[in-house]
Image: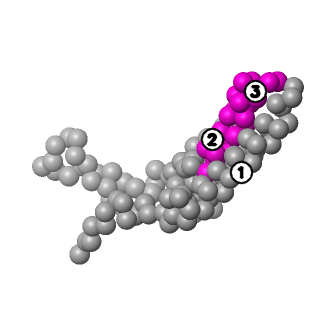
Amino acid sequence: MEIKVPKEVRQYHESIFFGLSLRQFGCSLAAVGAAVGLYFGCVDMLGTEATGWVCVLGAAPLALAGFFTYNGMPLEKFLWAVFKSRVLRARPRVFRAKNYCYVFFCEKGRLEKPAALFKYKRKEGKKKDETEMETV
């Protein structure tokens, strides 16, 4: 028996403040704090208009970090996965098939030829393409 669960129920996130989750609210507060710090640090040097742009550009990454998800991963897990795949384990992936029957029978000295494992025989009455496999 299968019970169908609506998509909205599976993607439920508890909201803490103003409809935001705790993570989103914390990142929003960090963005506001960064914007205020940048404003008071740059207003004397750059003027009001340029300082406004610096505040927006400085606070945007912090605000977006709270809302970013990729395949169910928050930003820090996503960045760690990218770092692992691009830096820590960065090498060409090579597929190497291993024939365990060959290793078991031939390299261990049990048989001389791998072809001796199976004997192909065509049964009479069958077409030329249809063969069956018999084990020895």
Q: Residue at x 72, y 35 (%)?
A: 55
Q: Residues within 10 Å of mark 1 (few under 14, many from 20)?
A: some
Q: Which residue is drawn at 46% across and 50% down?
A: 115
Q: Please check the rendered image and state whether residue 56 is part of the magenta-colored stretch, yes or no.
A: yes
Q: Residues within 10 Å of mark 2 (few under 14, many from 20)?
A: few
The magenta span reads 46-66
Q: Where is residue 26 in the image (x, y as percent from the top left)?
A: 66, 57
Q: What residue is shown with label 2? A: 93
| Residue 14 visible somewhere in the drawing | yes
Q: Which of 50 and 76 is in front in this view?
A: 50
Q: Which residue is drawn at 45% across and 57% down?
A: 117
Indicate the amino acid at tag 2.
Arg
Q: Please check the rendered image and state whether residue 130 is part of the magenta-colored stretch, yes or no.
A: no
| Residue 113 visible somewhere in the drawing | no
Please report contact status of discs 1 and 3: CB closer than 8 Å, yes or no: no
Q: What residue is shown with label 1? A: 30
